Amino acid sequence: LPTFSSPPSNAFPATSTPNPTGLAAKLSARDPSLLKNRLFNLPPSPQIYPPFLRGTWDVSLQFSGFLFPSSSLSKQTLLADTSIPGFQKCSIASLADVGKESITTYRMSIDETTGLEDRKVALKGSLNGFLGYDAVREVIYDGNAGGNPNRIGIDFVPNRTRNANRIELFCNGRESELVTYESQQQSKELPQSKQQAMLLPGGKIFLNSEYIRQVTFSLSQEFGVARQVSGNYAHFWTWKGNDSDPERIEGNLLTAAYLDAQDPLFFEEPSKPVVVYAHNLIGRKVVV
């Protein structure tokens, strides 16, 4: 089962208290029903990352579990619905093979000045990494140059990837929260001399989410007509920086998959996730 690894609210020392209605509180509750889909929102602003995450990182990502949280639909019913994001390759663009057991690596590059992520680098790297070959021809995105930060196009090398010739991503919402914490002792039951030697270093935790609608185009059995599949999902990242080792970050990614409005099962579970996937993340700073 996935670990909702954002620390519980009482794990944050008093330097910065999480917003009781914010993203940290939502994830700390470890309740998948709180990860509801957001379909109708004002266009969100691009994500600005905090200073401790800026720079270039080699990120390793490993699958750590899944959960079927719906109380309305059985696991057997959901497994028969192949349109749910994650059930087919490329149905979640940045996690093209969700349950892949081996570690996938990609590069995350965040501008030191603006705090904006290079989405082209990250998406191309993660897609190729999950699929195991150079599948992506081009990622089309102009959000960092004053364009639309909520739309990304992905063109695949023709006839190389069975489930996708092109993917369009539309972001419907974003959330983020930064929490800082001070050094703290591991155990108050130890003698004072040992407590001093076992201080946990202070640092920062950054949480952010992105709600995505994905439209995937691929070949169909009807000549000249593209197959089109729509899916809705949300990513919830938790990144932890360590003051004693600024060259390393650790994190967790939860991905909540929702039923599409055209799915016959939609009204059985219209807003809550029907499956949640979990991945563990480790990033190491790259000097470029």
Image (cartoon, rainbow, N blue to C red):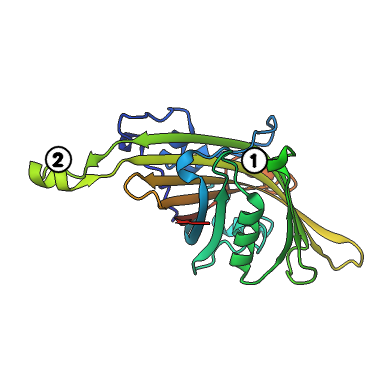
User: Where is residue 168 shown, x and y percent of the image?
Assistant: 75, 51
**Whole-percent x, y for residue 286 in the image:** 49, 57
Of all residues, the one furthest to the front in this rendering is 288
Q: Is residue 166 visible?
A: yes
> Which residue appears at 65% of the width and 64% of the height?
89
User: Going by the image, does 276 lie left or right of 89?
Assistant: left
108 or 158, which lies in front? 108
- Residue at disc 2, secondary structure: loop
The answer to whether residue 85 of the structure is visible from this angle is no
Q: Is residue 141 above or below residue 90?
A: above
Label of residue 188 in the image? 2
Hey, what amino acid is under mark 2? Lys
Q: Nearer the viewer, mark 1 or mark 2?
A: 2
What label does residue 199 carry, if any? Answer: none
User: Quadrant of the image for the N terminus?
Assistant: bottom left
Quadrant in the rendering for residue 203: top left
Dot 1 amino acid type: Pro
Please state which of residues 124 and 118 is positioned toward the viewer in this rendering.
118
For the residue pair 222 and 116, the one nearer the viewer reads as 116
Report which residue position mark 1 lands on: 270
Name the residue rendered at 28%, 44% in the picture. Answer: 201
